[in-house]
């Protein structure tokens, strides 16, 4: 097996709070273990356009507390083509990079898997996404911070909801996963969550109106996961206007404010642990795995598993939400 002397690190896909803490941890752990580090800017795009820089320990000073990613991030069209990946590979070889550490979500790890297969490049992935939708890890870098942001926003919305006795639909991120909506609802004491995982099983709006709304309260907050499968918060507000016109309904779409801000302690610790573990994985000869955490222990999950499988949502959480919203 080829000895690894120099790693390249990049962040890709949607930014997530804690990505900087992960960049710091990977860089410092690599240097600690005698490896050279190159920072690659704008995700796979920077490999393609050759935006690669030597990284020393000072490059990652004073960033653990910062949201976003100092390496920038992008979604790169060229990297999706074999020709684009060839250019990226040639640049990587020219820069003397033997292995890549990729911090990102589903799409980013899919790119890593293809690149690894085509060129035999050693890739290690770190789960960096607020959506928490990667299989094989209990949590992802950025999820806890986004959850806390949602909770703080809903706390504020509740003041208006109760004062005006309104029904609020609050749309949260998550792409096709309901983790942020469901746990955000539990954390903020919302009355219900509408999530993509149940979209084909039953009418979640009808279920909520029948089971809860206006039994004991005059206001309600429902978190809706943004997704084509749910139809989003506007869709439910329209439905309420048509089907239950007696209710005073409003919509808030939290949008990208959920991706920003200083990472929580949990996200900083997770990013630091996984960053160190990614270098350990390399030293142990692991290849093409995502480093995740299960039951508070670091695990290696083959890319094929992390990407292909849908991460199941804990159905007991729905019971918790329902019991506590009476
Ligand atoms: O994957 C993270 C995420 O924030 C999703 O929750 C959301 O659907 C998507 O990215 C939004 O992407 P963009 O910032 O490109 O609009």
Image: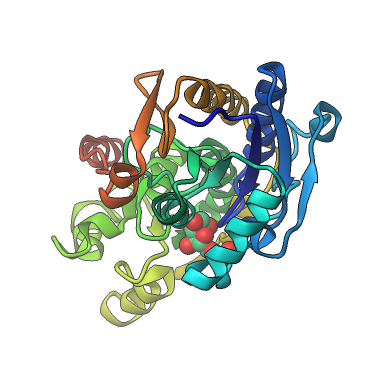
Q: How many marks?
A: 0
**Residue 222 placement (x, y as % from top left):** 39, 56
The answer, for residue 165, to whether it is visible in the render is no
- Establish if 119 lies above or below 59: below
- Establish if 137 lies above or below 326: above
- Establish if 2 lies above or below 216: above
The answer, for residue 177, to whether it is visible in the render is yes
| Residue reaching furthest to the front | 2
Which residue does the image show at 64% across and 51% down from the upper left?
92
| Residue reaching furthest to the left | 201
77 or 50, nearer to the observer: 50
Q: Is residue 241 left or right of residue 129?
A: left
191 or 305, nearer to the observer: 305
Q: Quadrant of residue 204?
A: bottom left
What's the image's color scheme? rainbow
133 or 227, nearer to the observer: 133
Q: Quadrant of residue 114?
A: bottom left
Which residue does the image show at 56% across and 59% down from the upper left?
254
Q: Is residue 76 left or right of residue 225?
A: right
Q: Is residue 101 left or right of residue 205?
A: right
Q: Quadrant of residue 221?
A: bottom left
**Residue 139 placement (x, y as % from top left):** 42, 34
Which residue does the image show at 58% across and 30% down from the upper left?
4
**Residue 13 placement (x, y as % from top left):** 56, 57
């Amino acid at each position: 097996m080829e000895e690894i002397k120099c790693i390249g690190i990049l962040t890709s896909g949607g930014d997530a709070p804690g990505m900087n803490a992960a960049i710091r941890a990977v860089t410092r752990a690599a240097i600690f273990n005698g490896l050279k580090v190159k920072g690659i800017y704008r995700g796979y795009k920077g490999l393609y356009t050759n935006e690669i820089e030597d990284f020393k320990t000072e490059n990652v000073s004073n960033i653990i507390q910062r949201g976003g990613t100092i390496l920038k991030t992008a979604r790169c069209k060229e990297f999706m083509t074999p020709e684009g990946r060839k250019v990226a590979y040639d640049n990587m070889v020219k820069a003397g990079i033997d292995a890549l550490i990729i911090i990102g979500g589903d799409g980013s790890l899919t790119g890593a898997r293809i690149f690894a297969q085509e060129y035999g490049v050693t890739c290690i992935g770190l789960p960096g996404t607020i959506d928490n939708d990667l299989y094989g890890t209990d949590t992802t870098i950025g999820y806890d911070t986004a959850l806390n942001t949602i909770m703080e926003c809903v706390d504020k919305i509740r003041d208006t909801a109760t004062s005006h006795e309104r029904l609020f639909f609050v749309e949260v991120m998550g792409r096709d996963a309901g983790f942020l909506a469901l746990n955000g609802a539990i954390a903020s004491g919302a009355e219900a969550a509408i999530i993509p995982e149940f979209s084909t099983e039953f009418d979640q709006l009808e279920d909520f109106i029948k089971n809860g709304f206006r039994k004991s309260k005059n206001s309600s907050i429902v978190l809706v996961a943004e997704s084509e499968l749910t139809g989003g918060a506007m869709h439910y507000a329209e439905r309420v206007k048509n089907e239950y016109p007696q209710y005073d309904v409003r919509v808030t779409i939290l949008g990208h404010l959920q991706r920003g801000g200083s990472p929580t302690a949990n996200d900083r610790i997770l990013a630091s642990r996984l960053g160190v573990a990614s270098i350990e994985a390399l030293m142990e000869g692991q290849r093409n795995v995502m480093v995740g955490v299960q039951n508070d222990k670091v695990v290696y999950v083959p890319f094929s598993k992390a990407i292909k499988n849908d991460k199941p949502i804990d159905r007991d959480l729905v019971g918790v939400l329902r019991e506590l919203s009476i």
